[in-house]
Every structure is written in structure tokens, then in C-alpha cells.
Amino acid sequence: MDNRRPPLAPAFRSLPEYVHHWAQATPDRRAFTFVDHPAPDSRGVHRTLTWRRLDVRVRAVAARLAEEAEPGARVALLCPQGLEYVTGFLATLAAGLIAVPLYPPGLPGQGDRLTAVLADARPSVVVTTSRHVGEVQELCDRIVAVDQVPDAAAPDLEPADAEIAYLQYTSGSTRTPAGVEISHANVAANARQALSAYGADAHPVTCVGWLPLYHDMGLVLSIAAPVVRGLLSVLMDPVAFLHEPARWLRLLAAHPRALSAAPNFAYDYCASAVTDAQKAELRLDGVAALINGSEPVRPGTADRFQAAFAGQGLVAQTHCPSYGLAEATVFVSAARPGEPLRRFALDRDALAQGKALPARPDDPRAVLLAGCGTPAGQQVRIVDPVSGDRLSEGEVGEIQVRGPNVGRGYWNQKEQTRRVFGTDGRLRTGDLGTVLEGQLIVTGRLKDLIVVDGRNHYPQDLEATVQDTHPALRRDRLAAFGVAGGSGERVVVVAEHTRTTSLAEIDVPALVRAVRAAVSGRHGVRLADVLLVPPGTVPRTSSGKVSRALTRERYLAGVYAADGAA
């Protein structure tokens, strides 16, 4: 029954209206399934909501929220990953309130961010589950536990007359978290854009995801897009993936035409951690698309993942390098499934000077990047970050975006809104990139650039060189950044060692010498400091990316010396 293509829905204004439509058109189809893993050896316990059941729960919780807050008030979602999160988010929108997607207190490494976001958003109500009520009582006077709201409180609701749907707080990788105002129109438009880009508007897919629902990609791909198209969304907890990555692959194999997304590290993690015995039970030939939205996307990641699972039938053309950001709801540009990965070998020195010139792929000084395809339903252009002048193909500049998915601005930050969102409708992303052969290529973050002796260096290039120099270095768990020095910017690298190796077992001086030699030889950069730190020490953003800004702050504060760094 669930393999049939759902009928097309009219264009509704908000996600709850789509839910109500599917509840009437296909009431018994599965809408959301959460796969819980209560024990280390669990194969997964499935809980499912049909569209009819979801509609009832959304209306019931929306009515309860309307009793607690006036339209336009903020509602903090402090639910764990699961069906209650989905219901609470959609109910907040249905009640005409502004959702603030977050997570329960106690998430490792995210306590300071949670405090900062709550102080900025000032929610009137907290939505959580009965299990977490005790943890959130000190955060807000008004608490609604989704699982304690009875169905009896499910009246028919008129579509809420509100413009802002939710505040998507930025991950904090380069600055203090700021809440992007995402309207109902923004999220519906971006869901349709993503569905179109990944072929899900023409062919039925199953959205399979473990990305946190408070993260922009998790929210749009696992909630908004399935709701707009009437697709089944299968969810699991991010912690369950980290404990056993094969769980994600089993879900991909179990559902027809699975569409999923993950950051760069997840693909490398699967390639290295999934055992031959686990691979033997997988059939991945039915996977429709695998999205990689890391910046920049490197072909090597796709190659390692493909090599690891080609024997399970994985088709190479399922890997879709993509680009997006919270200020654009999330999705901007993507390579289409079914097309070969577009690879670009670029001259590193020319790239540092703002030119994307071809190089031999086997040249050790070449930078290998993947094309992120083309936008869907929006305009992308490359401009000079200082003058704003449009640049020609092959010139590196700031990526600007215009489209119906671009958010309204930052919550209570007029000056920053004016600077980033402008007055001409063009979003200044702060990301650097270029266009080659019609493909968007993301090269890095403008604020992350390291300038040494007048030359630009991309930190991710330095990091890629460093992590390949020694097997004790943990991949994608290191940060390169610049700090002010007496004669200019000094370059520092902070890197975690692998979990399988203790610091006492590593010849740290030899490792540091190897790192310095590799960076000097390949990039012409002398590293001022190389610190080897324990696993889990390098901070990450809410989306799992390394936070160079916070790593730099901790370095300057002397935190790593206290941690026993070498």
C-alpha cells in the first residue's frame, strides 16, 4: 500500500494544512515511523503514525498550545528525536505560534548553545515529553508534554494566520547562534525545491534520516518535504547511528527508493566501521539518493563510501553533493541523482588568488572538489565580496542566493539582517565558491580564510593534508585556524587522536614533525602550533561539523594545554 505513488496535493500555505489534506486523501497510509534502539544489540522497535492519526495528534496538541500562548509567541521544542518531536513541531505551526526547534537539556557539548538560544528566543512555552518534564521545569513556567495531551482535545482548526513558522538557529560555527525567521511560505517552497532537485516530485521515495530534527536539513528533509509530498518518513536517533552506523544502512536497504542525507564524516564513518558481517545482510541497490551537504564536498568521501558498499549493490550515481544554509531554509543547490559525480581538480595557488584554474588530478598541489550541481527554483550568483560586482565563471567570490526560500532575516537583529539579507532580496551567504561548467563549487567560508604573507589559505585544505599524515589522527576531528601574531597571522592546528589509540602510545614529537613537514611542503605554510588532544575535545556545531571559531576561542583561552595537549 505504501509503495503506491501518493496523489499530488494542491499548494497549501502551511505544513499543517498539508497534513490535514493527506489525512483526508490517504488516511491509512503511513506518515512517520520512528525506529527506536533501546538496547545496544537492538534491531529496532518501530512506532508509526498514519496521516489520519498524525492529523488528530497535531490538532489536539495545537489546541492545548493555544490555551497557553497568544499567536506569535515562541515555543521551544525540547523533545528527543521521535514522533513527539514531529507532532509538537507541526502542532506549534497549526496553533499560529513560532516554533524554536531545539533539544532536551543534557545533550553533550550543546549546553551553552541551548542557554544562549533560549535567552534570545524567550519562549512562552516549552514542548517536551513526560520523560523530560523534570529536566525543563527550570527553563520555562509553561510546559506541554506532547504524550500527555489526550485525543479528545482535537477540534477542527482554522489555518493559523501567522507569517513566521519557526526560528532556525544557526549552528554557531562562525558566530553566536542567531535565529533565522523562516516563514510558512519559505519552508513549503524549500520543501518543493528539494523534492524537485532529488527527483522526489516525479517518483515516490521514502525519506530515511537520523539527522537531528532541530537541524535545518533534518527538519526539511525528514518533516517538511515528506509532509508536502505525502511521503513516508522513517526516523532514527543520531546517537543510535553513532553507536552502530549499520543501523542507518539497514533502514536504507529496507525501504524502497530511500532518500537520505548525512554530513561528510558519516560516510567515512560507515566506510570504516561497518563490518563485513553487517555488509552481508545489506542490499543497497534500491537507494534513490544520498545527500552530502558538507562544505566543501570532496570526491574522496564519495569514492570511499562507494568502494565500501559497491558489493551491496550501491549505485555510484546515488551520491549527491549539495549546498545549503539555514538562512535559505536549507536547500540551495544539488547534483541530481542518476548523474555521475562531477570532479574538479583545481590549482591550489590560483585558488588562493581567487581563480579556479584546472590542474592535473595527480598533482600533489591540486585541490580536488565535487560539483554541487545547480539550484532548483532559485537564483545563485558569485560576486566580489567587497564590491558586490558579479564575477565571471571560474572566478572565486561570495555565493549569493535569491528565491522564495530565503528567510525573512534574523530574530531581533536588524543590523545583521540588513547586512546579510540586504534590501535587494539577495542573501549574502558568507560562503566562497565559483561556477565551472554550470556546476556550483563551494570552496570554503569567507570568515574562515587564513591569510599568511598576503596569500589566502582554506582551512579545510590544511586539515585534509594534516589528517592524512598519521594514522593516529582522527579524520574530520581537527581544526586549522589563524591567530594574530607579532608579524602577521599565525596558523594553528588542533587535532584529536583516534579513540583506539591512547596518547601514551603515540610518538607525539614525530607526529608533529610529520604534520609540519606535510603542511610546509604542500601549502608553503609554517605551522605555529600543532596540538594533539583527546577524542571529543574539538568542539562541533549542532550539525556535527567542527567549529573552528570555538576551537580558536578555546585555544586562546589555554583550554587545550589544560587537557594535556601536546
Image (cartoon, helix red, strand yellow):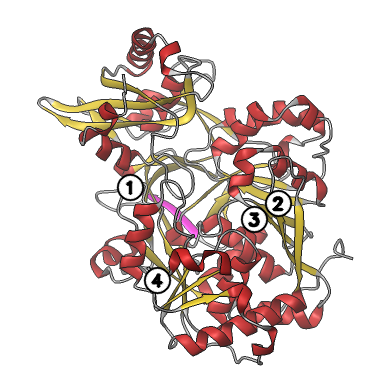
**Which residue matches tag 2?**
259
Viewer-side label of 3, 1: 1
**Residue 11 can be seen, yes or no:** no
First reached walking from the N terminus: tag 4 or tag 2: 2
225, 133: nearer the viewer: 133
Segment tinted magenta in the rendering = 379-383
Q: Position of residue 344 (x, y in %)?
A: 53, 30
Q: Is residue 380 magenta?
A: yes
Q: CA distance from mark 2 to mark 3?
A: 12 Å
521, 356: nearer the viewer: 521
First reached walking from the N terminus: tag 3 or tag 1: 1
Q: Position of residue 331 (x, y in %)?
A: 54, 57
Quadrant in the picture for residue 204: bottom right
Q: CA distance from mark 1 to mark 2?
A: 29 Å
First reached walking from the N terminus: tag 2 or tag 3: 3
Q: Is residue 38 above or below residue 295?
A: below
Viewer-side label of 4, 3: 4
- Check the picture and name the quadrant holding the C terminus: top left
**Which residue matches tag 1?**
174
Q: Which mark is residue 212?
A: none
**Which residue matches tag 3?**
197
Furthest-right residue in this view: 1
Please name the residue shown 37% across and 15% down the image: 515
Q: Which mark is residue 408?
A: 4
Please name the residue shown 40% across and 57% down the image: 170
Tag 2: amino acid: Leu
Tag 1: amino acid: Thr
Name the secondary structure under disc 2.
strand
Viewer-side label of 1, 4: 1
Query: Magenta stretch mostly in which secondary structure?
Result: strand
Q: CA distance from mark 4 to mark 3?
A: 23 Å
Please name the residue shown 70% across and 30% down the image: 274
